Image (tube, rainbow, N blue to C red):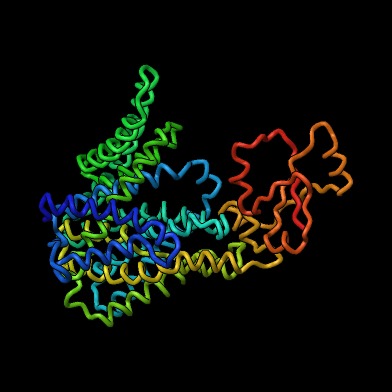
Amino acid sequence: MPDLTTALGLLAVVLVLSALAAGLVARAPLSFPMLFLALGVLLGGHGLGLLDVHADDPTLEAVAVICLALVLFIDAVDLRPQDLRRHWRLPLLTTGPGTMLTIALIAAAGMLTLGLSLVEALLVAAALSSLDPVVVRDVVRDTRIPNAIRQTLRLEAGTNDVVVLPAILILIAISQNTVSGAGGWLAFGLRLFVLGPVVGAATGIAGAWAISQAGRRTPIPTEYQALYGIGLVFAAFVAGEAAGSSGFLAAFVAGFAITAVNHTLCDCFVEYGEITAEMAMLLAFILLGAALPAVTEGLPLAAALLFAVLVLAVARPVAITLVLHRAAISHRARLFIAGFGPRGLSTLLLMLLVVHAGVPEAERLLGIAGVVVAVSLVLHGSAATPLGGWYGRRRTPDLRPEERESIAAGLFQGPPATVPRITPEELAAMLAGARPPLVLDVRSTVQRQTAGGRIPGDVAVAAGAIDDWTRGQDRSRPVVVYCT
């Protein structure tokens, strides 16, 4: 366990180095997870020996709990119910069949290459099926990639832990033989899937209601609203644990319940929560980097690397390609979604749950997952920026199907209904009238460059970004869209 001076030194490194390296990471084929995991390895016992951290270290456990609880809560707050109602098909496919098929394929690979037992293979597979929202964030923020594609990855990263986390908790119970009989499993299921979510939802709704009522009587400074939101995350986690369920699942449901009942937390909380989660995430990567070399000792390196290749290049691509086979997207986009499935901090944090639960061979399983994560961070972390540039450069005169869609749900819809058309002369007359329409130019970049002309006063909006652009616009004003 790091002493106080070491802990403060690590915080200093996280805060200072992240700021100094931010510009480099934004431009180079690098990512913060790559840098800080490597830094942890350098500082650990197999490097400079400045940091002594083990897989069961209480400090690592505390940082992991804080980080995972915050990430799950904030991800849930970002999952607007109205968005899920519109985009339900995509998260249902990727979170349900997509995740379960990925788990099955990874488990088969683990048994084949590493000789894992069925339960061990399923534990590793469930953790490795978690799409890391930290690494995928680099792609989600890249506007060179069509919005529908980015939204597909964002929704998957925000929802598939709902399947993965309970699966791991059930497998932990099986491996430890702590639950037996139909009655025991019924009680376990009720605690996990009913009591925990109910407690989490009640905590989230009550907490959001309390701060809104207090704010009506006396204005609350934004800094204290931000701190209140962090406290609400921890309260939901503790309530879930006290109920004998999962604190992480309770934290996720608490965040989702707040938005489901139209309660809102101050935007300052989301900003502060994301900053806090970012700091905890980078610190966790350093600690995990220091701990991983010890748990990977003794692993058959060749077999572990082969397993990593099967996880990243076969299991996810096959599973996602199958569930998206009816999506109206180009072959390139389907490969992009299927291939960009990074494993990162969420996988390692989930495996730490297995370690701290005392599952036999847990540290060995953590080491196996760690090898896959290390390979994924190098491949996906270094590829995120170049892939965005590649997608942006691969423009064609005609819009690809995914570039025409502004939402992920549109990838599964058939051809659009007939849209009313007007002639250029009719548009000219409307523009000269008392209430001229708003004209949107939704041509591709290549179309705009080759055509040369534009309608005076028009607004250039990418076809896939219309849905986001319309938010906050005057919906009573007529809109005319032109392409070619």
On-image quarter of the C terminus: bottom right
Q: Is residue 379 visible?
A: yes
Q: Is residue 96 visible?
A: no
478 relative to 12, above or below: above
Quadrant in which residue 358 is drawn: bottom left
Q: Residue furthest bottom?
A: 302
Residue drawn 22% across the image and 80% down it: 300
Residue drawn 41% across the image and 66% down it: 101
Residue drawn 14% across the image and 54% down it: 6
Residue 56, horizontal then vertical, whole percent: 14, 59
295 relative to 468, above or below: below
313 relative to 416, above or below: below
Q: Residue furthest top?
A: 217
Residue 177, horizontal then vertical, whole percent: 17, 59
On-image quarter of the N terminus: bottom left
Instruction: Please state which of residues 436 and 308 is positioned toward the viewer in this rendering.
Output: 436
Left or right of 461? Residue 419 is right
Residue 302, horizontal then vertical, whole percent: 28, 82
Q: Residue furthest right?
A: 425
Residue 55, horizontal then vertical, whole percent: 16, 61
Quadrant in which residue 263 is drawn: top left
Count of all numbered marks drawn on residues in the image: 0
Left or right of 478? Residue 152 is left
